[in-house]
Amino acid sequence: MRDDSPNSWESRADSFSLYGFTDLPSVHERGAVVVTHGKGPYVYDVHGREYLDANSGLWNMVAGFDHPGLAEAAKAQYDRFPGYHAFFGRMSDQTVLLSQKLVEVSPFEKGRVFYTNSGSEANDTMVKILWFLGAAEGNPQRRKIITRVNSYHGVTAVSASMTGKPYNSVFGLPLPGFIHVGCPHYWRFGQDGETEEQFTERMAKELEATIIKEGPDTIAGFFAEPVMGAGGAIPPSKGYFQAVQKVLKRYNIPLIADEVITGFGRTGNTWGCETYDFTPDAIISSKNLTAGYFPMGAVILGPDLADRVQAAAEAIEEFPHGFTASGHPVGCAVALKAIDVIMSEGLAENVRTLTPLFEEGMARLAENANIGEWRGKGLMGALEAVQDKATKTPFDGSLSVSERIANTCTDMGLICRPLGQAVVLCPPFIMTPAQMDEMFDKLEKALKKVFAEVA
Ligand code: PMP
């Protein structure tokens, strides 16, 4: 499959790239897929091969790969004013407009926005805000951060410490003070005879026990994705957010919703917290915020945190934090257009129309004897491969089942993502029902082929 000549795209990618989050034996054998352009939900590689990208790039290209309005918004802003910062009391008009818009579309009556270049930096920034607040309010010991096993919050030293995945140990992470509580995945972690409600109650009790053990006045915040993304598209167990928020309120610990994936439509509402009916104290946004057309992240503070951080900053006459490209005018112009495209030009509506088809397709594939469960919400979901459906026994890790499925799909012109032993789908919001059929048909063939080899 790969072109091994010295000057091929694959050889040059191999020679000059430090591949991130890439299975190296697999990329060396198969060659990198070097992509040149896209159309709708499809991308095309240097050999002219077409792939239906069922992962919206990295969960983010929700408007597809050739949306004219988004490219035009970027071009118009590049022509008008191509770059600026948000330091020293200066910022672009687009930055002001986007902050106002984000507070308006947030679940908050009022709030304040801070910009970053990525989701990782937005989480990092939120942690620094909480630390800043602790110090300013006479609680400098309030520094610990609680997140969940299997969560994903990013890759900077702080956001990787928040991430509840074992691979970060190769970096000597997590840093001290980052604590991980249980993952609310009932199918996998529910005990024999335990109802989903009892499981949720156990998760909340475990959180409370952790808070008490660590010392309630040492905890700065609790971060959670409404639906866990890179952990494997895991929706919370029934009543989870209500149960944990009750505990957090008891100890005055802010709940931060990491909506980097779920924000702007993915679960069928603007925010995942709307879908699960809770109001967090702050929201972390990125990805869909610009539909992937510009690197950007945002911290949206709800009223209480916004007022307190503002007061703390006024007291020392500054909030000493910011990135050169925070609130970049082109990013803000693109985000304003992306929010319009998603919320007013039919994309969010399409998510709601497509969701029943998505659920139907997932349920059909989950009938396979080697799929333990399908799970998901809106247009994000996962199929969990198992060797034994009744006992939920996973395949031997050395079989790399989900990687094989994803590679087989790639060969058929479908991009989907292996995560643990699950295959994750997160299609763009512009998909048509016919493209959704194509996605499920290809994936079904790949599942049959791989399970025939390994089961
Ligand atoms: N939080 C969540 C929930 C994410 O899914 C991601 C990225 N997949 C991040 C944070 C980190 O965002 P970035 O890759 O832009 O740093």
Image: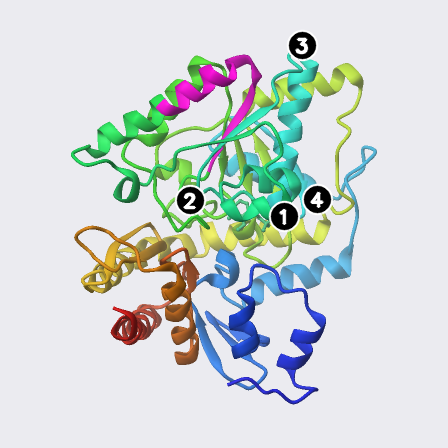
Give the spatial CA distance, label 3 vs label 2. 34 Å
Between the residue at mark 1 and the residue at mark 3, the CA separation in whole angstroms equals 30 Å
Query: Viewer-nearest of labels 1 and 2?
Result: 2
Are dots 1 and 4 in contact, CB under 8 Å? no
Q: Amino acid at mark 3?
A: Gly
Query: Residue drawn at (40%, 43%), measured in percent from left and top?
Result: 227
Which amino acid type is marked by label 2? Met
Q: Earlier in the sequence, mark 1 or mark 4?
A: 1
Q: In the image as oriented, which residue stretches furthest toward the right?
A: 88
SS at mark 4 in the image: loop
Q: Label 4 neighbourhood size at 10 Å, few (<14), some (14-19), many (20+)?
A: many
Task: Give residue 327's mark.
Answer: 4
Q: Which residues are magenta?
A: 206-224
Lower position in the chain sequence, tag 4 or tag 3: 3
Look at mark 2 in the image and give the residue it sits on: 228
Rendered position, 150 above or below 207: below
In the current view of this chain or complex, which residue is farthest to the top? 138
Q: What amino acid type is highlighted by mark number 1?
A: Ser
Q: Amino acid at mark 4?
A: Gly
Determine if residue 98 is in view. Answer: no
Q: Residue placed at 64% from the left, 49% from the top?
A: 296
The residue under label 3 is 138
- Marks 4/2 in contact by CB < 8 Å: the verdict is no
Gap in angstroms between the C-alphas marked 4 and 3: 31 Å
- Is 425 within the magenta? no
Q: Is mark 1 within 8 Å of ligand 1?
A: yes
Spatial CA span between label 1 and label 2 = 18 Å
Instruction: Tell which of 74 and 171 is nearer to you.
Output: 171
Q: Residue tagged by mark 1?
A: 118
